[in-house]
Image (cartoon, grey):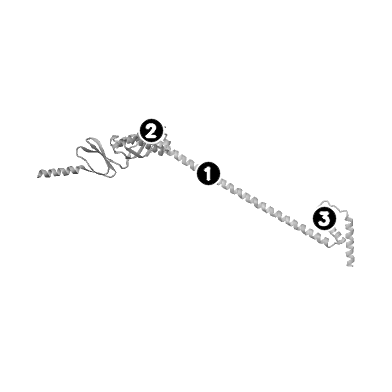
């Protein structure tokens, strides 16, 4: 009876040990008598003790390999420390198990070698400004090299680039000089723009003043022209009225006399005496006598 119980317990333990549950996002490599037999995916599986063995349990999740900084020499002989991060996942569990020994170490060495080759062909300035280019080339190179290992490289990033302290100080001085230069250029541009704006304002002011003077002179000329025209119209109207009134000879002679007086009272140094001045004087005399006779 005791023997049956012991055998039953052994059978139950052996049956339990034959049950294998593979978790989600995992795959197990199973060997039969030391030879690859199958790849178990997530779920319930059974194995035969002793002759079947789980050789490797592989996670299918995306993994991150953060490598230590590596010394790298640029083409202009600057030694700097560069550390990188590689994101990868296993896409073929069998190749990952049997394709390479210590796959993480293999990826690290491959990344370091690729990084040295790429940055060794670039200058320091190119390295600092071409991270995206270096990342893309490293991703392509490492992904192609890890295909036989069942590994898919999804992303490669240069996490940090550390030039020597002397180079860092020189770069800081250069950046400060560039900032000072840009500030001086902006100040000069501002002063130039202010001078241009001021000159344009003065120009517009001068133009407006000239336009105002021109307008004033035009208006004054128009006023004078209108005044002269009014005077001439008044004279013409006066002449017309005199002509329409049919003036007598005595009146005309008196007008000539008044004109002669005005000429004599002027500042002219020469006086032109009309040819009929004698007639004018005699006419004026007759007119005076006529006036006196009327008074008597």
From the top left corner, tell me how far across and down residue 86 is, in percent.
34, 39
Which residue is the site of mark 1?
Answer: 189
Q: Distance between the Cα atoms at labels 3 and 1? A: 73 Å
From the top left corner, tell me how far across and down residue 256 is, in percent.
85, 58
From the top left corner, tell me how far across and down residue 131 is, in percent.
40, 38
Q: Quadrant of residue 44?
A: top left
Badge number at residue 263? 3
Badge number at residue 167? none
Q: Distance between the Cα atoms at labels 2 and 1? A: 45 Å
Of residues 165 and 242, the one drawn nearer to the viewer in this rendering: 242
Q: Residue at x 67, y 54 (%)?
A: 216
Would residue 200 be visible to someone looking at this image?
A: yes
Would residue 28 be visible to someone looking at this image?
A: no
Of residues 213 and 242, the one drawn nearer to the viewer in this rendering: 242
Comparing labels 3 and 2, the label whose residue is closer to the camera: 2
Of residues 97 and 237, the one drawn nearer to the viewer in this rendering: 97
Q: Quadrant of residue 118?
A: top left
For the N terminus, give its image quadrant.
Answer: top left
Of all residues, the one furthest to the left in this rendering is: 1
From the top left corner, tell me how far across and down residue 206 is, in percent.
62, 49
Judge from the rendering whether residue 218 lies leftward or rightward of residue 89; answer left or right.
right
Element marked by disc 2: helix
């Amino acid at each position: 009876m005791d023997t049956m119980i012991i055998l039953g317990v052994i059978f139950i333990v052996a049956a339990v040990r034959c049950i294998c549950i593979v978790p989600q996002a995992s795959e197990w490599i199973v060997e039969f008598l030391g030879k690859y037999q199958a790849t178990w995916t997530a779920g319930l599986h059974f194995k035969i003790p002793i002759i079947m063995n789980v050789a490797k349990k592989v996670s299918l999740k995306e993994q991150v390999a953060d490598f230590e900084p590596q010394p790298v020499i640029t083409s202009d002989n600057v030694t700097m420390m560069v550390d990188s991060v590689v994101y990868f996942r296993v896409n073929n569990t069998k190749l990952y198990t049997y394709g390479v020994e210590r796959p993480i170490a293999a990826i690290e060495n491959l990344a370091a070698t690729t990084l040295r080759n790429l940055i060794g062909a670039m200058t320091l300035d190119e390295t600092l400004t071409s991270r995206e280019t270096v990342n893309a080339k490293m991703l392509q190179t490492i992904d192609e090299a890890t295909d036989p290992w069942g590994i898919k490289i999804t992303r490669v990033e240069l996490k940090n680039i550390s030039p020597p302290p002397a180079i860092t100080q020189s770069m800081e001085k250069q950046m400060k000089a560039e900032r000072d230069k840009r500030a001086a250029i902006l100040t000069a541009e501002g002063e130039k723009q202010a001078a241009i704006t001021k000159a344009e304002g003065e120009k517009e002011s001068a133009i407006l003043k000239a336009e105002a003077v021109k307008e004033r002179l035009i208006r004054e000329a128009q006023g004078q022209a209108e005044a002269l025209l009014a005077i001439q119209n008044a004279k013409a109207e006066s002449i017309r009225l005199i002509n329409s009134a049919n003036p007598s000879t005595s009146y005309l002679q008196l007008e000539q006399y008044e004109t002669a007086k005005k000429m004599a009272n002027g500042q002219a140094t020469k006086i032109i005496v009309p040819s009929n001045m004698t007639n004018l004087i005699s006419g004026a005399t007759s007119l005076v006598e006529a006036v006196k006779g009327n008074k008597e």
